[in-house]
Amino acid sequence: MEPDRRQFIARTALKVLAAEGSRGLTHRAVDTAAGVPAGSTSYYFRTRAALLSACLDDLVAQDHDELDVMYPLVTSADPDAMSKALADLLVSWLTTGRERHTARYELFMEAIRRPDLSAVLHRGGMGIRARVADVLAGLGADDAEARAHWLVATLDGVVFDRLAGANAAAPVDRADLLVVAQRLTAGALAP
């Protein structure tokens, strides 16, 4: 049961980050949001750094879970299937996953000033890129590793633009995001 409690607290901390920002992330705020007895968060994550690291670890785990679900769709050697899967992913991130990705960007900003957190962020990001590179290589992409890096960065840029950037007020339009995904897929798989 303890790993479930740790994950529950880390996931609740992500919700606090999204709602209150980095400055609002305290052990007490997480205890309150999670509805657990005072001191529970600090029992599992003694320091704020440990709590932030747990948030990042949980984000990366969620990313890997999404890749596991998408893997059969994007490895079918069908660019249309890959485009549709990427569009669905973007729609998900901008709707039901909006809170999670808002927390992600809070963590990115925190990591700029914290080398320990930056290392966790880098390790997790490189793991995701390696998996994407494997998919692209399986689809025959040249220089799959480099293409995976820019594909992940571009997806991240689209999400940031729609959450916090110039297009944050734009409605989430799957047809529009499908066009974006088709262009990204074409670029990722171009000879």
Image: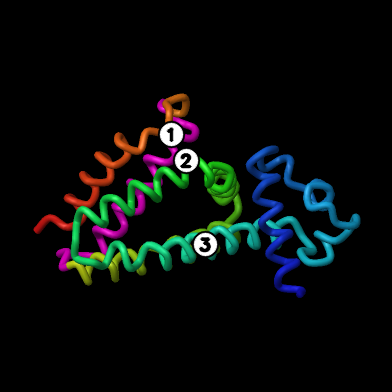
* Closer-to-camera residue (102/114): 102
The residue that mark 2 highlights is 94
The image quarter in which residue 58 lies: bottom right
Residue plotted at (57% across, 48% down): 100
The residue that mark 3 highlights is 60
Position in image of residue 15 (x %, y %): 67, 47
Q: CA distance from mark 1 to mark 3?
A: 21 Å
* Closer-to-camera residue (103/122): 103
Q: CA distance from mark 2 to mark 3?
A: 17 Å
Residue 146 falls left or right of residue 171: left
Position in image of residue 59 (x %, y %): 55, 58
- Does 57 sit above or below residue 93? below
- Does 138 sit above or below residue 21? below
Residue 190 falls left or right of residue 151: left
Task: Give the crowd class for mark 3: few <14, some 14-19, many >=20 residues within 10 Å.
Answer: many
Numbered badge on residue 104: none
Instruction: Count every numbered label the image shows and give the total.
Output: 3
Q: Give the structural element (helix, strand or loop) at label 1.
A: helix
In the rendered structure, are the residues bearing label 2 and label 1 in contact, judged by CB atoms less than 8 Å apart?
yes
Task: Give the crowd class for mark 1: few <14, some 14-19, many >=20 residues within 10 Å.
Answer: many
Magenta residues (range): 140-167
The image quarter in which residue 43 lies: bottom right
The residue that mark 1 highlights is 162
Position in image of residue 34 (x %, y %): 79, 52
